[in-house]
Image: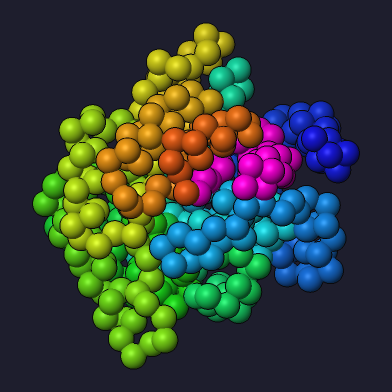
């Protein structure tokens, strides 16, 4: 590890994280996004931050999008794109904003985010709290972020989900609204049909429902690309780790048949069997579990998909160390995403993964 990485790692885990973890996790999250929003709006500060935490990684091209490194930010940390221009300075090679819905919504009742510290995990039941797709489009336009222009310094993906007030029979139009509003700003879309925190959402992973949704979204993307110099915006599907292998086979087949550009594996889990004894009190909390308890299952799902499909896979879930990232890449992941690992390890985690990935290139 370089001296710079040691400095960033020690500063975060030994000084900053103990202070942050004294406060409610959602309050800290909101403060962090406000701070990073300010950082992102200042070119000088962005450059200084990039000089401290930036590590050249291993560039790659996936679904026609050029990624400067293979380590990205997972959806959920920057739901409304307020910090979209800051993530490059923290070592990320791409950032996935959202999950955003067509209608603005407050999400579930608080408290809804919990730390499982002994397990290095988080339990959340946020419920897609966001300001809505139209507001995200305005935010990105204000930041000058459009598809392919790299105004954020890195590719920007957008995760779209179903509005809570919309029933399953209106889900397709709801997703189409978000895609249409945001198509000119997204380098790719992630279709979130796997969050456990919106009622009935995971039913959209099932056979006919997923086929109808994907055909509509890929069709709209193709329609919007007509007369443009660029191909249709790529569409990825984010799957749950709790699917059976048979259910996952069906999802893979449907993604291939309907023109999806790839699969993101995985979302959070409803399982609690990997919680440490000290965190068992959280077993009764509703919501999705992320972090170390998800590492083994997420890796298994990525490996399963990569062995059975030519579609690129983005590995997400339980990546807490550079060894976890290496295992994901070795299992066939073309890209990886961090969320809980970033909360527990800070920017040094992306730095370490990028440095190790570059050495292995």
Q: Position of residue 113 (x, y in %)?
A: 52, 35
Q: Quadrant of the N terminus?
A: top right
Toward the viewer: 354 or 243? 354
Asked if residue 291 can be seen in this view, the reply is no
**Residue, far bottom:** 227
Q: Position of residue 270 (x, y in %)?
A: 36, 28
Magenta extent: 335-361
**Residue 352 located within the stretch drawn in magenta:** yes
Instruction: Give the overall secondary structure of the magenta segment.
Output: helix
Q: Position of residue 130 (x, y in %)?
A: 46, 57
> Which residue is painted at 51% across and 40% down in the image?
329
Q: Is 169 positioned to the left or the right of 305 in the image?
A: left
**Residue, far top:** 277
9 in relation to 51, above or below: above
Q: Is 322 positioned to the left or the right of 293 in the image?
A: right
Toward the viewer: 218 or 126? 218
Its colouring scheme is rainbow
**Residue 261 located within the stretch drawn in magenta:** no
């Amino acid at each position: 590890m370089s001296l710079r990485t040691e400095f960033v790692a020690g500063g975060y885990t030994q000084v900053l994280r103990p202070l942050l973890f004294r406060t409610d996790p959602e309050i800290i999250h909101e403060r962090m996004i406000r701070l990073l929003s300010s950082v992102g709006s200042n070119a000088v500060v962005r450059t200084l931050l990039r000089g401290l935490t930036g590590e050249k990684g291993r560039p790659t091209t996936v679904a026609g999008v050029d990624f400067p490194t293979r380590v990205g930010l997972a959806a959920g940390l920057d739901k409304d794109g307020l910090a979209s221009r800051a993530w490059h300075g923290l070592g990320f090679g791409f950032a996935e904003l959202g999950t955003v819905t067509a209608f603005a919504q407050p999400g579930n009742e608080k408290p809804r985010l919990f730390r499982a510290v002994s397990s290095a995990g988080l339990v959340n039941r946020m419920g897609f709290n966001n300001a809505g797709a139209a507001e995200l489009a305005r935010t990105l336009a204000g930041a000058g972020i459009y598809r392919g222009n790299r105004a954020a310094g890195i590719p920007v993906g957008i995760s779209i989900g179903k509005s809570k007030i919309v029933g399953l029979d209106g889900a397709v139009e709801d997703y189409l609204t978000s895609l249409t509003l945001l198509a000119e700003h997204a380098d790719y879309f992630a279709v979130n049909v796997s969050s456990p925190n919106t009622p009935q959402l995971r039913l959209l992973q099932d056979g006919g429902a997923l086929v109808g949704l994907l055909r509509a979204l890929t069709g709209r993307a193709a329609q919007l690309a007509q007369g443009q110099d660029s191909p249709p915006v790529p569409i990825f599907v984010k799957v749950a780790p709790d699917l059976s292998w048979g259910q996952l086979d069906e999802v893979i087949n449907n993604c291939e048949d309907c023109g999806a550009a790839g699969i993101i594996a995985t979302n959070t889990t409803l399982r609690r069997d990997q919680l440490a004894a000290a965190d068992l009190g959280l077993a009764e909390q509703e919501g999705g579990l992320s972090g170390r308890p998800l590492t083994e299952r997420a890796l298994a799902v990525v490996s399963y998909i990569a062995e059975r499909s030519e579609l690129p896979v983005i590995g997400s879930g339980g990546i807490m160390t550079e060894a976890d990232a290496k295992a994901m890449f070795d299992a066939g992941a073309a890209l990886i995403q961090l969320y809980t690992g970033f909360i527990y390890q800070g920017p040094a985690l992306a730095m370490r993964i990028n440095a190790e990935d570059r050495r292995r290139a």
